[in-house]
C-alpha cells in the first residue's frame, strides 16, 4: 500500500505540473478570469480522473506520457463542472475542499466565465497537443461525456431530484451520468492514446462503470461514518440535505455489501488486461477501504 | 439588393433546418435542458455568423455545404455566450429579441446548464461530422476563438469596463475579442472546409476584423437613431447604461465616417478573392446601410 501511495502521489505531482503548464500564465490579461481558472484547477483535488487516465495508459501501452494530454483536459472539465455546480443558482456552496468556492473567492460573473473558459481550454489543449492519430476521437468522446446526455444531463437530473424520494435505479442513472461518464472517459482516453485494441478499451469502460458506483457508495458511507478531520469537511450533510444516497435507499449494511460487489465486478472487468491490471485493481481496492 | 436578401434568407432557412437537426430531439431527457437549448438556439437570430461561414465557403470552394458543420457549431457557441451573458450575475437581461431570456423562460440553473451543453454540442458536432482533413483544425480554432483570450476574455473586459470611461483602443480591444473573434473564425472556418489556400484564409480573417468593427459601429449608431419598431427593441439603452460606444467616444459624425472607412478596408481585404468576393462585399455594404 505504501508503494501504491507513493506511485499515486508521484503521478499527482506530475499531473499538477502539467496542469500548471497548460493554464494561461499569470498575470496575462484578462487577469481576473485567469486567476480564477488557476484557483479552480489547481486546488487540493485528488486528481482521480487524470490518475485513472495515466494508469489506464500505463496498463495498455508503451508511451503512457501521451495520456497526460487528455488527463489535463479531463481535470479542466471536472473543475469547470464543480465551479458551475457550486454557483448560487445551482448548489449554492460557499466552501469546497476547505476553501471558499470560486464565486466566493472572486465573483459569480468571474466564476461563471472561468468555468466556461476551462471548457474551451480543455478542447484546445487536446486539439493543439494530442497526436493526430487520436486527437479527434479524444475531442469527440470528451464532448459527448460532458454533454447534455452525460455530465450535464446528470447535473440536471440531480437538480430535479432534489428533496424528492427517488428509486435506486434513478439514483444510479444520475451517478452514471454525473460522475460515471467522465470516469469512464478517463480510462478509455488513456487507452486510446496508446492505440490499445478495442476490447481493452471496452474492458476499461466496464471497469469505470463499476468503479464509479463504488466511488459513489463509499462517498455516501463516509458522509455517515467518516472522520471529519480526515475528510476535511463535516459529515452528515447528505442527511441534513435529504439527499438521495445508497445508504438512505438500501440501508448502511446493504450499501457496504453492494460496494464489495462493485469492487468484484470492477476487477473482473479488467480480466482482458491480465497482469497489466494490477495497478488499477489496487486503486479500486483502495477506493473500497478509503477513509477520505 | 432583392437578390441579396433572398440569397441570405434562403441560407437562413437551410441553417435553421441544420440547427434543428443537430439538436437533441425533443422530448429526449433531460427534457428541461434540451428544451432550453432549442429555445436559445432556434430563436429569431439573424444567423450572421453561420451565413458568413457558408458564404466564405461558397467564395473559396466547390463544396460549400460542408461548411454547414462549423456554421452550426458557431451558432451554438454564439447562443451559449448570449445565454450566459444574459444571466443575473452578468448583464441581468430579461428580454432578448423580443422574448424572455433563457433564464426567465426556464430557470437560472437550467439556462446555465443549457449554455454549457451548447458548448459541448458545438465541439461534438464538429468532431462527429466534419471531414477528417479539417475537423481538428476546426475544433482547435473554435476552442481558441471561444477561450479566455478571445470571446470569454472580451466578456470579462466588457464587464470590468462597465460604468468607467474607456479609450477608443480599449473599446476596440473588447469588441475584437467579444464579437470579432467568432466572426473571424466563421469566415476562416468556411474557407478551411474548402481546403482554401492560406492567403485566402488570411484575407477572410482581415475582412472579418473590419466587418466586426463595422458591425459594432452601426450597432452603436442604431441604438441612437434607429427605428425601435424595426429593431424590435427600444433605443437609447447604451446611453441609459452609460455604455462605452463609438459615438460616445468619438461623436456621431466621426462614428459614421469611421464605419465607411471600415467598409472600405473590409472590401479591400478581399482583393485576393477577385470576383469571388462579390457576395461578401454585398453583405458588408448591407451592414453599413442596415436599419436593424
Image (cartoon, coloured by chain):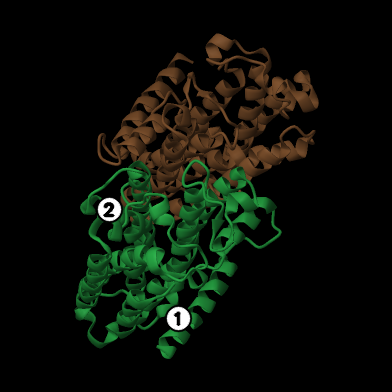
Chain colours: A brown, B green
**Mark 1, other Cα within 10 Å: few <14 / some 14–19 / many ≥20:** many
Give how far across and how far down residue B87 sits, in percent: 52, 46
Give how far across and how far down residue A141 sits, in percent: 50, 51
**Mark 2, other Cα within 10 Å: few <14 / some 14–19 / many ≥20:** some
Residue at 28% of width from left, 82% of height from top? Answer: B277
Q: Secondary structure at mark 1?
A: helix
Q: Which residue is mark 2?
A: B171
Disc number for residue B8 = 1
Q: Who comes first in sequence, dot 2 or dot 1?
A: 1
Residue at 58% of width from left, 45% of height from top? Answer: A152
Q: Secondary structure at mark 2?
A: helix
Horizontal side of B72 relative to A30 (left or right) equals right
Give how far across and how far down residue A101 sits, in percent: 48, 27
Q: Report the label total.
A: 2
Q: Nearer the viewer, mark 2 or mark 1?
A: 2
Identify whether B121 is placed above or below B158. below
The answer to which of A82 and A62 lies nearer the viewer is: A82
Horizontal side of A36 relative to A165 (left or right) equals left
Q: Quadrant of the C terminus of chain A?
A: top right
The span from disc 2 to disc 1 (Cα, nearest Å) is: 30 Å
Identify whether B211 is placed above or below B139. below
Residue A59 seen from this side: no
Horizontal side of A76 relative to A128 (left or right) equals right
Identify whether A49 is placed above or below A257. below
Label 1 chain ID? B
Amino acid at each position: 500500500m505504501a508503494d501504491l501511495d507513493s506511485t499515486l502521489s508521484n503521478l499527482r505531482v506530475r499531473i499538477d505540473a502539467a496542469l500548471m503548464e497548460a493554464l494561461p500564465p499569470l498575470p496575462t490579461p484578462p487577469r481576473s478570469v485567469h486567476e480564477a481558472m488557476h484557483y479552480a484547477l489547481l486546488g487540493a483535488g485528488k486528481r482521480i480522473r487524470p490518475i485513472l487516465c495515466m494508469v489506464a495508459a500505463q496498463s495498455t501501452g508503451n508511451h503512457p506520457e501521451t495520456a497526460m494530454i487528455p488527463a489535463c483536459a479531463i481535470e479542466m472539465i471536472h473543475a469547470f463542472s464543480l465551479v458551475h455546480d457550486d454557483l448560487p443558482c445551482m448548489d449554492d456552496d460557499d466552501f469546497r475542499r476547505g476553501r471558499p468556492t470560486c464565486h466566493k473567492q472572486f465573483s459569480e460573473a468571474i466564476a461563471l466565465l472561468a468555468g466556461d473558459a476551462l471548457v474551451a481550454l480543455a478542447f484546445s489543449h487536446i486539439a493543439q497537443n494530442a497526436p493526430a492519430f487520436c486527437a479527434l476521437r479524444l475531442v469527440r468522446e470528451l464532448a459527448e461525456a460532458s454533454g447534455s446526455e452525460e455530465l450535464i444531463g446528470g447535473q440536471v437530473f440531480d437538480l430535479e431530484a432534489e428533496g424528492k424520494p427517488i428509486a435506486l435505479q434513478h439514483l444510479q442513472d444520475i451517478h452514471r451520468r454525473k460522475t460515471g461518464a467522465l470516469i469512464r472517459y478517463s480510462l478509455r482516453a488513456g487507452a486510446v492514446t496508446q492505440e490499445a485494441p478495442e476490447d481493452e478499451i471496452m474492458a476499461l469502460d466496464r471497469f469505470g462503470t463499476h468503479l464509479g458506483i463504488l466511488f459513489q457508495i463509499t462517498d455516501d458511507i463516509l458522509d455517515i461514518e467518516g472522520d471529519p478531520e480526515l475528510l476535511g469537511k463535516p459529515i452528515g450533510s447528505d442527511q441534513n440535505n435529504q439527499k438521495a444516497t445508497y445508504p438512505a435507499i438500501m440501508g448502511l449494511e446493504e450499501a457496504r455489501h453492494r460496494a464489495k460487489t462493485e469492487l468484484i465486478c470492477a476487477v473482473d472487468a479488467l480480466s482482458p488486461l491480465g497482469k497489466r491490471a494490477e495497478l488499477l485493481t489496487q486503486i479500486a481496492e483502495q477506493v473500497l477501504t478509503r477513509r477520505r
